[in-house]
Amino acid sequence: MTISALPIAIRALREVGIMKSDLGFLIISALTINDIIGWIIFTLLLSLFSLQFFDWKIATEIIAYTGIFTFLALNVGKKIVNWLFSKVINQDSDGIQGVLAVLISTGVVFGLITLEIGIHTLFGFFIAGIVAGDSPIFTKSARNTVHNFVYSIFASLFFVNIGLKINFFESFNLFLALFITFVGIAGRYLGAWTGSTLSRNTKYRNIISITHTPGSEMHIVVSLIALSFGLLNKELFVAIVFAAILSSIINGPWLAIASKRFTYLENLEILIYPNIKVEAQYKEEAIYKLLNIFNLNVLETNILENILDKEDNVCSALENSIAIPKGVVEENTKTRVIFARLENPINWNSLDGRLTKNIFLILTSKEEEENQIKIIKKITNFSKDCDSIKYLDLLSSEKEIEEYLTKKFSI
């Protein structure tokens, strides 16, 4: 009941337009850590329940080995997998086949290790996914291939198998289903609310808490394992499946309503790069050139390092050839956005695989933290409007572009 559906949360954050903000990164990080801890506790409980008699020595060994495996996998294993990815990409034209082979092999190896430890193999595959997903070499095209492969084949077979095993109509208990739904949503919401309060992040705790509420396929997988171990009966399993689906359905609209506070943007300054176009071969070079027009000492203020660190954590590329790198400046100034058009589009690892052509560099002060979320939301929604982007591409003067973007973003 503690595990949240990370894919559902990511999709919801992407739909409301705040996925690429610092808040979005904080939420995804919290959800990832929450899932890891939840999986560790769950697999440990399963292994302990599977023992014929409880032995403190065996239990301690399982807990210790699980902790050591998780630590080594997320540190040493990540470096090894990243090295293997680089090798197969050098030998393969697009790298996708080699990357898939490394990913599946890593899952098998990690699964065998967890099986030897005495915990469920699914935990090994889960950690393998985290290790591979954290690699910068694991491109968007490879991710999409894995996503399509899993959801078109394995996910379909998984749900068909559940349907064949259990008669949902006979095992459905309305009161139990509603009770589990309420306990699950309320528990995850209040848990995240408490965590936000303790970390003094009260300004956005409602948004953070809402993104922790969906259950989705994570709950179904976990509850099916528990059912196979005899820890659940069929009525409780069906109730958990119902709760997982309902919590996922309501998450998107709930988050959309809560994120309406990020609508009215004030204190915004839009600048256009001189002559609009900038020449750069890499995104680091493009960001450096855009920063220079602010008359900031890039090296002394560490602004460039700050922006590139954010790029390493969350790629700022959006769909339709747009990128939104962002940074924080010390002085209390207006939120500033500088627009530039790349002379030659470059690879920014975008969501749709296109080369990036239009850059919106966002600079906010620490006092204007919420403005970053608001402008990112506006630009993200703008990137989804193909007609608006086509019109922007037709504009050729700095004044026309400034007036057009001011009208779009200052509402």
Image (cartoon, rainbow, N blue to C red):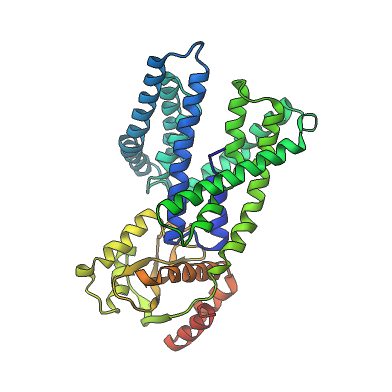
Q: In screen coordinates, is 232 left or right of 323? A: right
Q: Give residue 281's quadrant in the image.
A: bottom left
The one of 56 and 295 positioned closer to us in this rendering: 56
Farthest residue, direction bottom: 399
Q: Is residue 195 above or below residue 257?
A: above
Q: In screen coordinates, is 248 left or right of 34? A: right
* Residue 24 percent across, percent down from the top left: 46, 57
The one of 286 and 31 positioned closer to us in this rendering: 31
Q: Quadrant of the C terminus?
A: bottom right
Name the residue located 47 percent from the left edge and 35 percent from the top edge: 126
Q: Is residue 33 above or below residue 387?
A: above
> Is residue 28 something one can see in this rendering?
yes
* Residue 113 percent across, percent down from the top left: 40, 23
Q: Give residue 90's quadrant in the image.
A: top left
Q: Is residue 90 above or below residue 255?
A: above
Q: In screen coordinates, is 171 left or right of 264? A: right
Q: In screen coordinates, is 168 left or right of 409? A: right
The one of 259 and 70 positioned closer to us in this rendering: 259
Q: Quadrant of the N terminus?
A: top right
